[in-house]
Image (cartoon, rainbow, N blue to C red):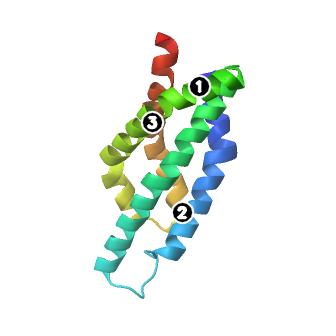
Amino acid sequence: MRSLSFFFEGLLISGPMMSFSFSLFESMFPTDTEDITAFRKSVNSLFQLMLDTIFMDTFYVLSAFMTSGLFEGLPISLLIAKLRTDFVSCLTTSWMSSLALSPLEIANFRFVPKEWRTIMMNFTDVLWNAFVSFGLHRKRQLG
């Protein structure tokens, strides 16, 4: 069930949101243009990475938390209780894995054309999803 919930969450929620957010970040901090210096592109890549990690990882963890709980048949009341107790630790795990993967993410924001960024990020997300899935289910299996 866990794999199925992550598949549908990625297909219907995270994938489209990632594509939208990468376009938004590129419009705010461009890297895919010849009008700015290489240094500025690198700085803009860091800004895009920070926005992705702080805001979008939070959204993705919340989304994964909710969809996996619903797919596993948890009642809403139990899901909300688990969210209150486990969300912060799972989000921290997400941020730590994003930190570990940040060289790949910076290269993605800096060198990959914007139309390919979502696909490239999906490769790193396989690892990220493993960390988040472990964080989501670690306490469920113990409790």
Residue at (50%, 34%) from the top-left corner? Answer: 87
Q: Secondary structure at mark 1?
A: helix
Dot 3 crowding, Cα within 10 Å, few <14, some 14–19, many 20+ = few
Q: CA distance from mark 3 to mark 1?
A: 13 Å
> Residue at image x 45%, y 33%?
90
Q: Position of residue 98 (x, y in %)?
A: 38, 46
The residue that disc 3 covers is 88
Task: Say whether residue 120 is visible.
Answer: no
Q: Is residue 99 above or below residue 106?
A: above
**Which mark is in front, 1 or 2?**
1
10 or 62, nearer to the observer:
62
Residue 141 drawn above or below residue 22:
above
Q: Disc 3 residue type?
A: Val
Q: Mark 1 packing: few (<14 Cα in 10 Å), some, or many (20+)?
A: few
Residue 142 percent across, percent down from the top left? 46, 11
Please give the residue where the numbered disc 1 appears in the rendered image.
81
Give percent across and percent down for residue 35: 42, 88
- Amino acid type for the residue under numbered disc 2: Phe
Q: Disc 1 marks which amino acid? A: Ala
